[in-house]
Image: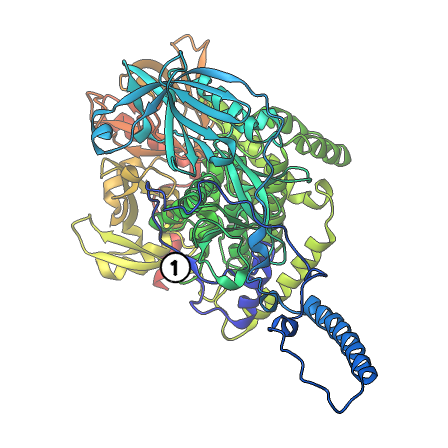
Amino acid sequence: MQSALPSEDIKLLEDFFNGDMYGTLSVGKTLDDWSISNDSEPEEFITPPTPPVRVDSLPEEEQHPLQNTPKEKPKTQWFTSNEVAKDNTTEAKKLGVWLKKQWKGALEKAPDVVKGIKNRDAVVQRPELEVKSFVHKKGMLYKVQSGPVEDLFGEYSGRWCILQNSNFICYSDNTCDSIKEHFPAESILSVQILQDPKFKYKYDNDDLHCFELNTTGKSRGGHVYGTRDIAERRVWMRCIAESLTKKFPAKISTEYTRMGWAYLREGVSGRWVGAWLMLAGRTLYYAIDNQSTKNLDLRQVRCMLLQVYQESDNNPRTNDKGPNIVVDTPNVTLYLRMWTSRETKVWCHIVKLAAHNNGAYLDQQQLTKNEIPVLVEKCINFIYTHGSMSEGIYRRPGTNTSVAEILTKFRKDAWAVQLTVDKSTEHDVATALKRFFRDLPEPVLSSTQRQYLHQVSMVKNKEERIRMYKASLDQLPPISYKTAKKLFSHLHFIASQSNKNLMTAENLAAVWGPSLMHQEEKDNSVSNSKHLQNVIVVKQLLEMYRDIFPEDPTEIEKEKIMLQVLEKHSQGPQSGINSKGAGDFRVWIYLHNKEGQPVNIAVGPNKTAYDVCVELSPKINMPVHELILEEVVLNEKLQRPVHFSEKVLDIVLRWSYWDEPDRKDNHLVLLPYTKYSDFVVDKNTPLSADLKFSDNRSRGFKLYTFEFSQAKLNCYKDRTCDEKLFSYNVEDILWYLGNESKRNPQSRWTITFIETKIHPQRTKSCPYFGNVIIWGDPHTRAKWLGAMLRARFRESLKQPAMHVNLMTN
């Protein structure tokens, strides 16, 4: 567990990591809460006004302010001659010309307010319309009437619509006698597809596929039209877009969500210009006059908000003083301003939805500037800072509620998540990262490459193996490749600190193999074999990371700096890294049964069941050699004796991978050894019998021939033993007495066994817990399980005498 208040070094390290993902953005006052009104604001103009011609200085013919005063009749110069008066007039004219030139020069350097221009950018032109538009489209559309009565009864009006020469005209019928609506191109603010369930209208039992035309002028507001054919709606939207501008490729204009125009500024120092906008998927395209079309990957949007209007910002003149939109990405910050507040707010809402629309696949996540999912990079940076030296990192599980909360927040808005030590431990974040990779529909090391990677792992020549790994990884999609490189770089560093965190490359591979190369096999023996091969692949990729991935000098330098800070922090008095001993994990042990006295003890990674018996024997008033630890799971339906050499922490951690209903009441009990005395056998003997069996896919039981020989449990289809159904090494299975209540074996003498390296997960195809075998009497069952136990541990279930002597001496 980390210290709640990290040192200055750790704080600097956090800032060091965040520098690659965050930028400084000063957006001034913002609007955190806003609503979208369906009513358009009053507009002074029918269409956006054409601004006056922009000027850079006063015209030549403009008079000096001092010369604009009424001319006074000159006083008589009785004391001068006419020649002197004439000379004075000439000098005055020269002086006036000189003053005029000086005034003109001063005005050229003066601010706009001195010249009588309050806002130079108020004259920004809207983007150019497509003047040579010959888009022609006509057909029947259904206009959705707005109003409380119409909304209640769902009233629609048929319209014969014609789009020609940038004019969208709606007639009452195809005779074109009566015009109902007329929208010139200059009055159209935006057009948007309507996919929200609240816009699911029907006409004569046919679904209407609707789009909304937002306009200014006398008919301002949103006008909803629908078609009976979803493809027809796309055609109409494409034609409307092309009638406004041809700046966007046909592929984009065919599949866009919303399109319109706005005033746009790139960066704080940029100039406001008119631009066309088009939102398609999770990409925002924008086109400025006389420039090529640009795009913004909304997956990389770090921050998006509404900024309060301020006079000092030189905002272009629009219909009202509504807010601006600020879209901040690692590469550019865009400022957007629409003609009305309603347009601005709707655009902000729909673009934000697209930016935060995180899917299930890796390339559907919000991304950093390195094109790595934000979740992955933030979790890795947190673990670098707070978990690199933590014992059992990635092996010890986090708290389920905390892990679920972390993943939920990342799905909602990954950039908004702030991981802090006061709310999450390094193990919570590590478990969340593993679960994210495990839950991907397609693993990072894709299923199409799995078989090839297995073959590469068996190549003996190291140089050839490296070459083949490189070639295989180069075939990954860009985001998958960069994510894999980032993760393996991180795990390689964690393995380099195994003397502190006890997580070698082999240990990390055992943990990460199922997450990075997960797969499901119907045959349990095949599944186990594939699992081991996956672990070998991941282990080799970790050990040969520097050889497989291109060397990055900045990455190596970053690791050096990070290691210096972590070592300095771990040696300081304020260190919170690995500050506790091995016994920083505590569990409850019940005495005799669950109704007995519970005792809370500290459990470290090396604490065995025998150590627990030694510690608690005074509390139960029995000698150690007469005690045994029992694991009780699945709502007390399954129990098993824990061998004295087993590590208690491994048992508890194993539960964390089970489904919540299967683990919620699991516990350990310390009780007298006599309960399991029947399982003591002196020697290993081959056993064979016809036993009823059911796997985790079926409820019913069938008769098969079982054999236990040479430390293997074999199952055959019949007594001929010609067809083997499966075979397990005894160390690869974990067995419990009993069975879950959903099954009906018609016998009390059953065992349920699961694979030790495959965590039991209930699915639609495998709804039951483990595999069940039935015996006819308790003595035969005890004989089989005793033989299996001795073959597994090479020793009796009873603790040997030397352990007792060690305790008593």
- Image colouring: rainbow
From what the image shows, is residue 321 above or below residue 138? below
> Residue 569 occupies which quadrant of the picture?
bottom right
Pick the residue in front: 642 or 204: 204
Q: In the image, residue 633 lies at what x, y percent?
A: 28, 40
Q: In the image, residue 573 lies at what x, y percent?
A: 51, 75
Q: Quadrant of the N terminus?
A: bottom left
Q: Amino acid at mark 1?
A: Lys
From what the image shows, is residue 499 above or below residue 457? below
Q: Quadrant of the C terminus?
A: bottom left
Pick the residue in front: 554 or 49: 49
Identified at 36% across, 42% down, the residue is 40
Q: In the image, residue 601 lies at what x, y percent?
A: 32, 59
- Outermost residue on the bottom side: it is 79
Under circle 1, the secondary element is: loop
Within 10 Å of disc 1 (Cα), the crowding (few <14, some 14-19, many 20+) is: few
Observer able to see residue 586: yes
Position of residue 79 in the picture relative to residue 699 (left or right): right
- Outermost residue on the left side: it is 595
Q: How many marks?
A: 1
Observer able to see residue 524: no
Position of residue 679 in the picture relative to residue 492 (left or right): left
In this figure, which residue is indicated by the disc labeled 1?
Answer: 423
Identified at 63% across, 29% down, the residue is 453
Pick the residue in front: 282 or 69: 69
Identified at 46% across, 23% down, the residue is 521
Q: In the image, residue 73 lies at what x, y percent?
A: 64, 78
